[in-house]
Image: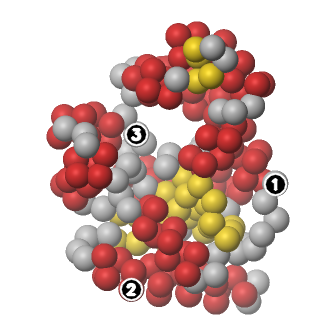
């Protein structure tokens, strides 16, 4: 059984993943997979072909790449067209079950790879404050990054389950624990 944990930047996906692990899920992150891919020559070559200034001395400069793709929608789509199929291919290699995958950006066509898609719904102000505190972003930078991502309405529409992340960390833990136990029970019967 495979579930995807989706939500925008600063929504609390990582905290939800910790709870999934506590409930018995084997947890992986698309960001971690991408970091591993960024060490492979064939992937670096694809990035260099699409974004020549983002590869220096055979290594991807993540800051340069981020500045390119987060300031231009078509460039972001170009990167996603390279990264998403590679990430989904790597996810498919995992045989562990139950498996939870943290997906910062929902991958088009990825819904077929998962039994459940859990959307972490978080108020915008809470996300902005998290990004400001946790990543040192200005309010303007946080808003720009949030706006560069898939809209919440689309993530909600793609999801099969929603965890509401308003309120305290304890409330999030309680909601996530109940949901994961429900998912595990549901898929045990299948």
Give the secondary structure at mark 3.
loop
The disc, 2 or 3, on the residue closer to the chain's N-terminal end is 3
Q: Position of residue 82 (x, y in %)?
A: 65, 28
> In the rendered image of this protein, does residue 122 appear above or below residue 131?
below
- Res 108 quadrant in image: top right
Residue contact at pointers 1 and 3, CB within 8 angstroms: no
Residue contact at pointers 2 and 1, CB within 8 angstroms: no
Q: Which mark is drawn over residue 93? A: 1
Give the secondary structure at mark 2.
helix
Give the secondary structure at mark 1.
loop
User: On the picture, is 122 further left or further right than 190?
Assistant: left
The disc, 1 or 3, on the residue closer to the chain's N-terminal end is 1
Q: Which mark is drawn over residue 149? A: 3
- Res 45 quadrant in image: top right
Q: Position of residue 142 (x, y in %)?
A: 26, 40
User: Looking at this rendering, what residue extends furthest in the front direction?
Assistant: 57
Considering the image in quadrants, where does the C terminus appear?
A: bottom right
Residue highlighted by disc 2: 174
Q: Which mark is drawn over residue 66? A: none
Q: Position of residue 178 (x, y in %)?
A: 47, 87
- Mark 2: few, some, or many residues within 10 Å (few <14, many ≥20)? few
Residue lying at 64% horizontally and 75% vertically, measured from the top left: 25
Residue lying at 63% horizontally and 55% vertically, measured from the top left: 111
Residue lying at 65% horizontally and 33% vertically, measured from the top left: 38
**What is the CA distance from the residue labelled 2 to the residue labelled 3?**
28 Å
Residue lying at 17% horizontally and 40% vertically, measured from the top left: 139
């Amino acid at each position: 059984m495979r579930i995807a944990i989706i939500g925008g930047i600063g929504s609390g996906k990582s905290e939800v993943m910790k709870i999934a692990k506590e409930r018995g899920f084997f947890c992986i992150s698309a960001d971690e997979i991408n970091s591993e891919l960024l060490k492979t020559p064939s992937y670096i070559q694809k990035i260099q072909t699409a974004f020549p200034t983002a590869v220096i001395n055979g290594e991807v400069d993540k800051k340069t790449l981020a500045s390119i793709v987060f300031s231009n929608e078509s460039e972001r789509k170009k990167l996603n067209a390279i990264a998403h199929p590679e990430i989904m291919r790597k996810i498919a290699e995992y045989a562990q079950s139950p498996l939870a995958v943290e997906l910062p950006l929902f991958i088009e066509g990825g819904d077929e790879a998962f039994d459940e898609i859990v959307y972490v719904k978080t108020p915008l102000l809470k996300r902005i404050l998290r990004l400001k505190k946790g990543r040192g972003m200005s309010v303007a930078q946080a808003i720009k990054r949030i706006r560069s991502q898939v809209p919440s309405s689309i993530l909600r529409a793609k999801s099969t389950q929603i965890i509401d992340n308003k309120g305290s960390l304890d409330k999030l833990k309680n909601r996530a624990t109940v949901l994961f136990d429900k998912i595990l029970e549901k898929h045990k019967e299948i």
